[in-house]
Image: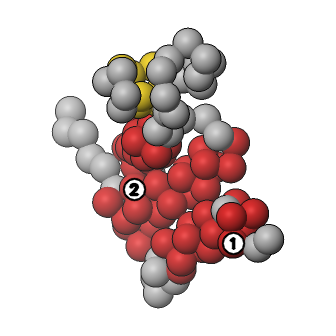
C-alpha cells in the first residue's frame, strides 16, 4: 500500500490548524530556555524557571494536525476545489494572528 499525501492540503490545513491552535492556546509543548526544559502540554509555568516559549509547540501542533489531514485528503480534490484561491489561506492566518495580538498593538 502506497501512502499518498496532499502537499496542497497540508498547506491549507496547516494555516487553518495554526489559527485554531493559536486561538485556543493549545501548544503541543512549551520550551523553557532558562532551565533548558521541555514541558508537554499546557503545564503550570510556576513549576519551571523563567518564561515558557509556546511558539515551537504551536507549530508542532499545527503540523501534526495538517499532516493527518493531508494523509486523508487527495491532492487532486484540493486542487479542483481551490484552483486559484489557495494563496488566500496564509494571508488569512497572518490576519488572524494579528487579530489575536491586537492588544499589543493598540493601547
Is residue 82 visible to us here? no
Q: Secondary structure at mark 1?
A: helix
- Measured along the vertical axis of the image, is residue 16 above or below residue 25? below
Q: Residues within 10 Å of mark 2 (few under 14, many from 20)?
A: many
Q: Secondary structure at mark 2?
A: helix
Q: Camera-side residue: 14 or 106?
A: 106
**Picture quarter with the C terminus:** bottom right
Q: Left of 89 or right of it: where is 74? A: left
Residue 30, which numbered label? none
Residues marked 2 and 1 touching at CB (< 8 Å)? no
Mark identifier at residue 10? 2
Q: How far is disc 2 from disc 1 in space, using C-alphas?
A: 31 Å
In the image, residue 102 above or below residue 70: below
Task: Name the residue located 41 percent from the left edge and 73 percent from the top edge.
Answer: 79
Image quarter (top left, top right, bottom left or bottom right) of the N terminus: top left
Task: Identify the coloring.
Answer: secondary structure
Q: Earlier in the sequence, mark 2 or mark 1?
A: 2
Q: Which residue is mark 1?
A: 105
**Where residue 30 appears, x then y in whole percent?**
47, 30
Residue at 36%, 21% in the rendered image: 35
Amino acid at each position: 500500500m502506497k501512502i499518498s499525501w496532499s502537499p496542497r492540503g497540508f498547506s491549507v490545513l496547516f494555516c487553518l490548524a495554526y489559527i485554531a491552535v493559536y486561538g485556543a492556546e493549545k501548544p503541543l509543548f512549551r520550551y523553557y530556555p532558562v532551565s533548558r526544559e521541555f514541558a508537554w502540554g499546557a503545564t503550570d509555568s510556576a513549576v519551571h524557571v523563567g518564561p515558557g516559549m509556546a511558539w515551537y509547540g504551536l507549530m508542532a501542533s499545527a503540523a501534526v494536525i495538517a499532516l493527518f489531514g493531508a494523509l486523508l485528503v487527495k491532492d487532486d480534490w484540493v486542487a479542483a476545489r481551490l484552483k486559484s484561491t489557495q494563496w488566500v489561506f496564509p494571508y488569512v492566518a497572518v490576519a488572524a494572528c494579528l487579530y489575536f495580538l491586537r492588544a499589543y498593538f493598540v493601547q
